[in-house]
Image: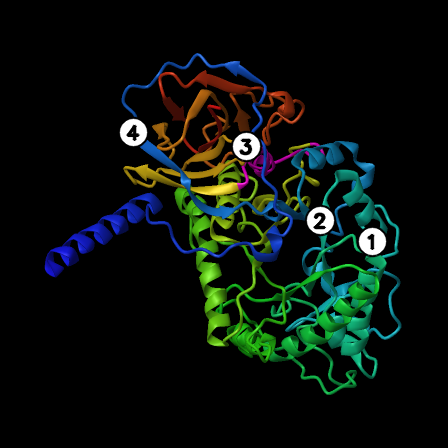
Amino acid sequence: MKLIFFKKNAIYFLFIALIISINTNGQENVSDHGLFIKDWQGKSFKKPKSVKSNDKPIENVSSIITVYNDVKLNKVSRYISGINATTYTGNYLADNKFLKFVSALSPSIIRFPGGDASNVYFFKKLPADLPSKSLTYNGEWPGFSDGTEDVNWKMNTEKYYAFLDSVKSEGIITVNYPYARYGTSKNPVAKAASYAADWVRFDKGRTKYWEVGNETYACWEGGFRIDTTLNKDGQPEYINGKLYGEHFKVFADSMRVAAKEIGTEIFIGAVFVDDDDVWDGSGKNVTKNWNGLLAQELRKSDGGNYADFITVHSYFLNNEKTPKEIINSFNVSKELQNFIYKKLDKAKVEHVPLALTEWNIKSPYQTTQIGGLQAVSTSCRMQEIGFGASCYFSLKDYWRGEKSDFGIFSHNDPSLPESEPYPSFYHLYYLNNIIGDKMIKTQIVPNIDSLSCFASSYESGGIGMIIINKSGIEQSFKIDLPNFKIGNNYYWYELSKYDDGNIWSEKIAINEISNPKHSKGGPSENFTKIPAWTKSTKQGITMKIKGLSAIYLLIDRKN
């Protein structure tokens, strides 16, 4: 009897394990977004304005996409939809067209003074204890930036806050860490930390998220090297991860005290490098050893982490050349997460959320349709695996000729009027408008790597999906939704590469509507008024998607 009982129980538990395996569908272990979902809220499904599609049902599809509404991957962090603002691309407040577009995009957070400029930016008047220049590994950054200076080409501190108010976004601020290195006072670390704390006080609780420095490990940054003859506290000529970690704690202590004084809570990020082998022109192995040395400094006596989050940057591409390779580089985000957490594990330091506060892809693909497909894929992947926040680079940069532009809006591009959106803008706009509040599991069969799919659910019911065709030819698919009561209709927008014969086209169409005035961009004058296409679900959900295109799909749930 005991043997029979054991066999029955073994079969029972094997059956339960099989059920769990089927239901989770190979769900990977992922981090959650940590402190970045403290203010998480469920979202309500909203039917878009739509017109009926005359597309006929497809009898034989090339792929079946199964959406597991009951397998939740992660909550959606609203802070993934952030972006960088630059100091050198004009007065945003004077550009009503630009303000309208940014308000429509509705980025959750806007990083400032974004990028390398933060190394020489002072939010108020310049202090007296500055050298004539800040040093890179073999050169210099000439001059420093006065945050009170009011000139047309420059974003200053006052304009930044006014810009946030105008577009109804929050901020994430990068304080000037290298001042702790190149400052010429007797105690430059304490002086720089106090200056950062003064910005927290000046901010008066408007900003929750702060970073100590930009790419402080990088040989091309001001403050990477200092003139030791001007330094008065015995710092080495070149920065290293241990030194930054020691200084980070001084900054964090000062800034937290300031926040407490004004009755607010802030969260502070420490800067990690995205790869041990990032180019280091100094030959000092600064980047190679950066994360390991820094992680040790961040470890509290109880194993906790002195940083509230880890900030990291990536421009993704290495040797990728084809459209599919470039789009698939979104998988780098998981590799990056594993890389950082292994460094923390080795130092026995608590995991904290990651924030990819500066990212894009390398030249010359940024302003192409391919760049837009990579951007939305990366954003979705970060939601799935638990990045806390991200800030795309950037709202505006400048036209670099054959090297394209890192902005999502034109700036000095001879082919476009000022402030015209590039394809990435439209993809990020539609993503923000269709994504739900939880990411859910999907599976594509057969898995031939022509399609990618990301799906989310709404607390009120309904599903928002993004389907991406990474191939150059049309694909077809069917949506299968087990354990989900499908409503009467589904709705979609297709953002397709404009048919101009150029695989690297910088022009797109939205539901076959493009902009005849320009050779780049999209239908900027009326894109918010373009209706979704809609069809009944009575014959299922079968669709076609053009080559190198994305479909933003909403599926209603039956009450």
| Quarter of the rendering containing residue 30 | bottom left
Q: Which mark is residue 460?
A: 3
The tally of labels here is 4
Q: Do tag 1 and tag 4 residues touch (Cβ < 8 Å)?
A: no
Asked if disc 2 and disc 4 are in contact, CB closer than 8 Å, the reply is: no
Residue at x 79%, y 77% (from the top left corner): 190
For mark 4, give the secondary structure: loop
Residue at point 34%, 40% (across, down): 443
Q: Which residue is mark 4?
A: 62
Q: Residues within 10 Å of mark 3 (few under 14, many from 20)?
A: some
Pointer 3 and pointer 4: residues touching (CB < 8 Å)? no
- Above or below residue 320? Residue 477 is above
- Amino acid type, label 3: Ser
Q: Earlier in the sequence, mark 2 or mark 3?
A: 2
Residue position for label 2: 85
Residue furthest bottom as drawn: 234
Farthest-out residue, front: 1
Q: Which residue is mark 1?
A: 157
Q: Is 71 within the magenta? A: no
Query: Could you classify mark 1 by the number of other residues whose Cα lies within 10 Å: few (under 14), some (14-19), or many (20 or more)?
Result: many
User: In the image, residue 172 lies at what x, y percent?
Assistant: 70, 54
**Comparing labels 3 and 4, the label whose residue is closer to the camera:** 3
Tell me if label 1 and label 3 are in contact, CB under 8 Å.
no
Instruction: Name the residue type under label 1.
Output: Thr
SS at badge 2: loop
- Is 180 situated above or below 366? below
User: Residue 18: x and y, percent?
Assistant: 25, 48
Image: magenta residue range = 417-437
Q: How far is mark 1 from mark 3, CA to CA?
A: 40 Å
